[in-house]
Image (spheres, grey):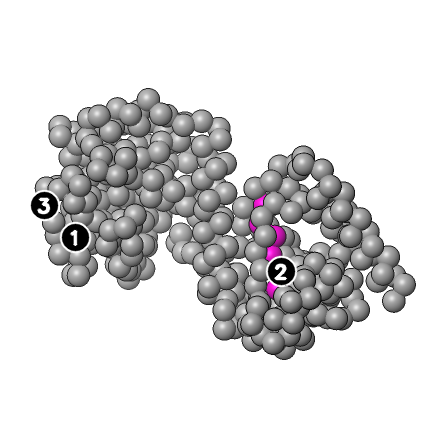
Amino acid sequence: MKKSFNQFSVIGISLFLLFACDYKPASFGSFQKIIVFADSTIYKSIQPELEQTFDQFVYTPHSERSFFLDFHPVSALDTYKSRRNILFIGVIGASDAVSEFVTGSLSEQTRQAVIENKVFEIFRDNIFASEQTVMFFPGKDAEQIAKNLRDRGQLIFEKLHALYLTKMESAMFFEGEQTTLEEYLAKSYDWKVRVQHDYRLVKEEPGGKVVWFRRLNPDRNLFIYRFPGEKNLDKVDWTFDLRDSLTTIYYEADSIDRTDSYAQIIDFRGEKAIKLTGIWQNHKLLIGGPFRTIIFYDPATGYTYLLDMCVTAPGEMKKNYLDQLEIMARSFTSVGKM
């Protein structure tokens, strides 16, 4: 018990010092890694539910995890407290160091709500460092924590993934943004996207029919195509054919591997859209890779837009590249909404 109290005291002192000063260091490390602090017995008992919540896979065509769990004892807090994502898991009133910390971090009202299972996941920003997400998963016992992960895991994942994209966007454009090019797009075509500093405008056709941004090493593409009028988005089959017709011309005859690709209806900046996700292939060049495509009608300009994102990076992890492309694509703003 004395050892547990001493560990908790160190944590409390560290927190006091961090909250007592205005300056906080910048968080660092992988955007996808979650540093987990929990009693080892509790962690092992809920590990399957944690992995089911966070270890969701993206196929590129290899399986890549959305997030990685990295468990550490509480004694390592000073080493990892400036990482981008931190998770504390504890049982209210338990005597292990992390549970004591979690219990002490919550108000009496919140602790009671946890015991009554009215509160579970708690997200906090920038406790130890800037641009940081800190999560608390408290429960009255390990069984309650495991059940809440089973019941609320997808909601928790989606919230963390949204925060992940926000932090990635901030980091992407911190290094530089091509605002002059963005202003040119708005003036020329009545729409714009945020363009990261090292992308190049490699092709544009009259009237903005095609606008193509590209970055090499590895090869990443944001390809924007538009045509006048509105297309019925309730039927998705034509979207695969549309992409294939364009990639036949512009991407040296790439085509969609339809056995490993799917379509879904999404909301895109307030408009109904179709999102294609999957694998492209080129039988002539014997290469392939992941892609995402968003198709939507923009009433402000009167055009239907196709925003295509694809990556060629043999032997490399590709999810981060795709996410960065989608961040650029989702920054699309038409003249009526600027």
Magenta segment main secondary structure: strand
What span is in magenta? 132-139
Above/below status of 114 relative to 221: below
Q: Amino acid at mark 2?
A: Phe
Q: Residue at coordinates 19% horizontally, 26% vertically from top-left?
A: 188
Secondary structure beneath dot 1 equals: helix
How far is disc 1 from disc 2 in space, using C-alphas?
Answer: 46 Å
> Which residue is at the front of the view, 313 or 322?
322
Indicate the quadrant where residue 193 lies.
top left
Question: Circle 1 sits on which residue?
Answer: 241
Q: Amino acid at mark 1?
A: Asp
In the drawing, does residue 223 fall left or right of residue 111?
Answer: left
Counting from the top left corner in percent of width and height, residue 90 is at: 69, 66
The answer to whether residue 288 shows anywhere in this view is: no
> Which residue is at the front of the view, 4 or 249?
4
Determine crowd level at label 2: few under 14, some 14-19, many 20+ residues with C-alpha closer than 10 A.
Answer: many
Question: Circle 3 sits on which residue?
Answer: 229
Q: Amino acid at mark 3?
A: Gly
Quarter of the image where the C terminus is located: top left
Counting from the top left corner in percent of width and height, residue 289 is at: 35, 47
